[in-house]
Image (cartoon, rainbow, N blue to C red):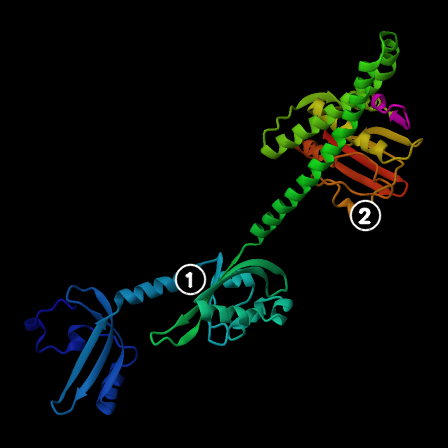
Amino acid sequence: MYGYSREEALGHISNQLLQTQYPGIKNSAFATVMETGSWEGRLVQTRKDGSVIVVDGKRVLDRDAGRILEVTREVTDEIAHSERFKVLVESVKDYAIFLLDTKGRVSSWNEGARRIKGYEDHEILGRHFSAFYPQEDIEAGKPERELRMARESGHVEDEGWRVRKDGTRFFALVVVTALYDLSGKLTGYAKVTRDITARQLERQRLLDLERSKSAFLNLVAHELRSPLTVLRGYLSMFRDASSERRRDLEERSLPALEAKTIEMSRLVDQMVEVARLEEGSLRLRADRVDLCAIADEAVGLVRALEEPPAHSIVFEPFPGELNVLGDPERIQMILSNLLSNAIKYSPSGTEVTVMLDQTAELGRVAINDQGVGIPLSEQIRLFSRFMRVDRPGSDHVPGTGMGLYLSRELARRMGGDIVLQWSGPGGSSFALLMPLAEK
């Protein structure tokens, strides 16, 4: 262990030969041996080749022979591993790793625990680990139940909400392991906690998305059924009509057939655009376009689709051109969606106003209606995907809940935005904002 031969070592004082370093005063160890007959402790010694080792030493006095028997066991590697593990645990920031005594009181605390739970060492050491649980879990006996399960099966895993020092909650993945000594006696528990709030929120988001997609598919099926029913009805009439009646039928049915075809085309276009957004394959142009001209086209399209006309669409053009940067087809889709919503949610005979203006950096198209308005509690959900906001008396209004979500996403990806300017019992005002083109 030390590298010396018998001949090299005999006759030397061991403390000098091995350059022994004691945990305290050397003479106190000698005095203890002489007084009590034995001493034990951890020593640092030096080998013949100059390398330093750590040993667990024990010295026993043989009074009859007048000598001291020294027994040592090298623990250098054990100490190194222990120290490295201690440094590792204390430096881990993504996991709270700490020990509990047999009563469940915190007996160690690492940097990850401080970061995740917010307590400093002196604030938590000695306190029961139930301090990390919501009150409802404490009342249900969850902390003690987890310790019992760890004792019975060796360890227990759990996912659930935990509480930080400041009272905020986080979703945690927790593993509690029971610790025993060589005799099988329980010595405490090791507890590892990881903050997986982001993962849990993503799970919930995906769950909500699946639910909303199911609702969306039901809405799409419903929305397609209506125009398809009209198309089938007219086709049946054409099939059964005499040649004399078909000309009259064409004149009466073609506008309705065209409107329903455009309605289905818009729905399909929206579905395709949403799919492209979801998969990241959407490509947008950044052309210099006249926002006034596009708004005028959108108004004309919506007027043509409302058959028979039930609303007055007042278009207040901007004096001159209002040039912005964007994809003209997508801008027209956005304005058509906003105008369609304004008409759908406004009583017959009311007025929808389209106004244009500009700021130093943005061109704006404001669309004001005289509809039922949007409750404040529902405004936060307006732009969610596949979601429809229910308003009083609007159960009959068609729609898939894609329009506003898609419109705002398109606007933002072109450097603009869609905002709800105001809403109340007398109507609502939405505005499309687009970046101005350089002059």
Judge whether 298 appears above or below 211 on screen. Answer: above
Q: Which quarter of the rendered picture does the C terminus lie within? A: top right
Relative to 411, is 182 on the left or the right?
left
Q: Looking at the rendered structure, which numbered label has been put on residue 376?
A: 2
Tell me the CA gap for discs 1 and 2: 49 Å
Of residues 426 and 311, the one nearer the viewer is 311
Query: Could you say where residue 129 lies in the image, as x and y percent from the top left?
Result: 54, 70
The numbered disc on residue 252 is none
Which residue is at 41% across, 75% downward?
A: 187
> Residue 283, how many percent across, how many down?
61, 26
The kind of residue tagged 2 is Leu
- How many neighbours does mark 2 have within 10 angstroms: few (below 14), some (14-19), or many (20 or more)? few
* Residue 331 rendering spot, x and y as whole percentages: 73, 26
Residue 318, quarter of the rendered image: top right
State which tag comes first along the sequence, 1 or 2: 1
Kind of residue indicated by mark 1: Val
Start and end of the magenta stretch? 303-315
Give the mark toward the camera: 1 or 2: 2
SS at badge 1: helix
Q: Residue at x 39, y 77 (%)?
A: 185
Residue 310 lies in the magenta stretch: yes
x 91%, y 28%: residue? 310
Q: Say if residue 251 shows up in the picture.
A: yes
Give whichever of 288, 302 is nearer the camera.
302
Side (left or right) of 338 relative to 79: right
Q: Residue at x 70, y 32 (%)?
A: 411
- Residue corresponding to mark 1: 89
Magenta-span inclusion, residue 26:
no
- Note whether residue 332 is visible: no
Give the vertical position of 268 relative to 134 (above or below): above
Q: Is residue 250 above or below residue 14?
A: above
Q: Give 276 or 420, whichever is nearer the viewer.
A: 276
